[in-house]
Amino acid sequence: MINRVAESLARSKGWRPGHSLRLGVAVSGGGDSVFLLYALRELGVAAAVLHVNHGLRGAESDRDEAFVRDLAGRFELPCHVFVAPVIQGNTEQEARRLRYRFFHEHIALGHCDAVATGHTLDDQAETVLYRFLRGSGTAGLSGIRPVHVDPASGAMILRPLLGLGRDEIRQWLGDRRAEWREDSSNANHEYARNRIRNLHLPELSRSINPGLPQVLASTAEWAQGEEDYWSAELDRLEPRHLTRRGEAVLLRVAPLRALDLAVQRRLLRRAMERARGSLRAIDFAHVEAARALLSTDEGSGRVQLPDLDIYRSFDWLRLSRLGYDSRLARDFELELPVPGRLEIAERQLTIESELVTSSHVYNGGVNGVLDRDRCESPLVLRNWQPGDQFQRSGHAPGKMKTLFQEDRIPLWERRAWPVVVSGKSVVWSRRFGVSAPYAAGPETRNAVVIREVHSEELESNPLGTTSTDMKRDSGAGSRQTHVPGAEVL
């Protein structure tokens, strides 16, 4: 039994007997964690005992703590105890979060190199069956990993008992008359995990397959290999298909539809994970609901999933957390300095204007320069509003809503679409540039270049160095450069 634990450590950590390894041992007082402590102490790698007292069973929890402290003392190991606060909400989920935060803290403090927990083959089997019954795909069926590295802190959790069954561990402890504690809450069948452990899995093993726990554990190992492959493949595909826009994730519909079904599902799950931070409570039906939005060449739609909002508009799919769009008020309105720069940090929006005085101004066909003398004062930057009109060069005036549709602007982009107004008239808009009645021409004397500055340009393009596709008089002659106009997306 001890050798099997050593072999597990060798596979997961690359450790060999005699090599230095300092493990914190998570000991609840139950048989599995007590055996883990015996095994790791005998292998010379136990550096500290870690115990969490959740206080959920009153005096019984306190007696478990006292038992663990005494056991650590007999083994001459330091014992670190965390008395957890009262848990609100999902008891199992929150308790687990608190435990692992405690483990990560002690790794960070240098009390150990990693933490080992006492999850066994039976725990693995119960996890796989539980997730299967909840509708998990192969990601869920991969169960408990032998090694988990926290992406935020780098803290490592090891599970060296995943190859050992609960019965053989109890037999080993009994043969040595080693004591352990039984958690009375394990008999509480209000919890689905306890019903699976005490009722369903034993019944399935008796009536269908005595080796079912091992079959389920093997399924987890098989699924872990599948997930490792897909993780590497998605790392390769993600930069091609997923685009970050603030806290949202965007995907182009056509390239996604062209992929094989399995890849579509995997990329959507990866996008969901990026948008909401985890895949907890996301199942197959949720992925298919998102994939249904891809079913047409043209279209719009929306589906709301647990803490996830998914929009389809024209060529794009956008995933974000619920309430993402309502965090900021829809409307904003600020005076635009001319010349100058106006930055609205919370909207990641920067608009700058450059005032040019010349007798030789022209637009160069891009409709990107404003005739200041045709405008009222002041110029105001605000969001687009229903009813706003805009006239493209060579076209009749029309509603901006029509331009959005013609240019296939996604719905979520329109919400805070920036425009500059003079009085009640839109004189400039993101992407569309200057409205024709206000565009500079050969007769213009006071011209203004208005442009949106992207974050990557702010350091390299300081205010006052905006290039323009116009002739500008100076004392030493004139020069011709390029006008960016109002292109944005």
Image: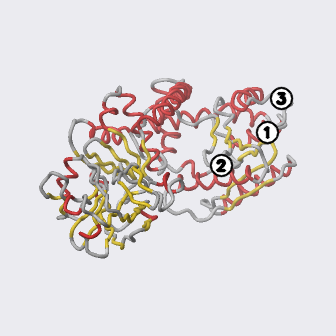
* Outermost residue to the bottom: 377
Measured as percent of width and height from the top left, residue 167 is found at 65, 33
Residue 38's disc is 1
At 78% from the left edge and 36% from the top edge, which residue is drawn?
39
Q: Check if mark 1's residue and mark 2's residue have beta carbons within 8 Å.
A: no
In the picture provided, is 43 more to the left or to the right than 314? Answer: right
Q: CA distance from mark 3 to mark 2?
A: 27 Å
- Decide which of 27, 169 is in the foreground and name it: 27
At 43% from the left edge and 47% from the top edge, which residue is drawn?
281
Tell me the kind of residue under disc 3.
Pro
Tell me the kind of residue under disc 1.
Tyr
Q: Check if mark 3's residue and mark 2's residue have beta carbons within 8 Å.
A: no
Disc with the residue nearer the chain's start (1 vs 2): 1
Q: Secondary structure at mark 1?
A: helix
Q: Secondary structure at mark 2?
A: loop
Measured as percent of width and height from the top left, residue 17 is found at 83, 29
Residue with the mark numbered 3: 17
Residue with the mark numbered 2: 153
All told, the count of numbered labels is 3
